[in-house]
Amino acid sequence: MPAPTVSSDQPPRAVVALPFGRLGITCTETQIVQLDYLPPDTALVPPLTALGHEAARQLQAYCSDAAFVFDLPLADAGTAFQRRVWELLRRIPCGQTRSYADAAAELQSAARAVGQACAANPFAPIVPCHRIVARQGLGGFAHSTAADGYLLGIKRWLLQHEARRRDA
């Protein structure tokens, strides 16, 4: 199989295997541009940059220990409202959740707007949008509400992983 080609205007993307599935890491030499949850059959692609390797290492460390604190440079992204939501996500302690409605009340917004900002999060799980749930059940995840889909399976894994840490 030939090596993946990378256009000069597109940062390289690695695809790594984590316990919950495949994750795409798009980064430049100096910043993480985007992380993507990918279908389970996505082909693995090794990181091509030092930062890509470091991101993969830190993601593996988080998967081994939910208390791991990420230290990666994230690119500027999102609208002012999305950034407010993402900052709120980062303040939710590991092993805890908040409902879309509670987050919306704190931000003086609407639950649907919070959900859309969570779905647009380009840095999950570093920015932990999985910690926002519906009042009854998981809610959606990464624009998916399919109960049997791989994306909600990832959200379940992340929440269970962090709950094990809390219960330990």
Image (spheres, helix red, strand yellow):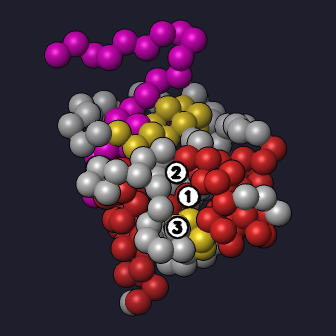
Of the image marks 2 and 3, the number of the one nearer the N terminus = 2
Identify the mark at residue 154; answer none if there is no mark: none
Tell me which corner region of the image, top left, top right, bottom left or bottom right, holds residue 28.
top right
- x 60%, y 73%: residue: 98
Identify the mark at residue 133; answer none if there is no mark: 3
Residue with the mark numbered 2: 124
At label 1, counting other C-alpha atoms closer than 10 Å, the crowd grade (few under 14, some 14-19, many 20 or more) is: many
Going by the numbered disc 2, the residue's amino acid type is Ala
- Nearer-the-camera pick, 91 or 114: 114
Question: Mark 3 or mark 1, which is nearer to you?
Answer: 3
Determine the CA span between mark 2 and mark 3. 15 Å
Q: Picture coordinates of residue 50 (x, y %)?
A: 49, 36
Question: Mark 2 or mark 3, which is nearer to you?
Answer: 3
Going by the numbered disc 3, the residue's amino acid type is Val
Identify the mark at residue 129; answer none if there is no mark: 1
- x 73%, y 58%: residue: 110
* Residue numbers of the magenta segment: 1-24
Please, what secondary structure does the residue beneath circle 3 have?
strand
Image position of 67 (left or right of 92): left
- Nearer-the-camera pick, 100 or 68: 100
Quarter holding the N terminus? top left
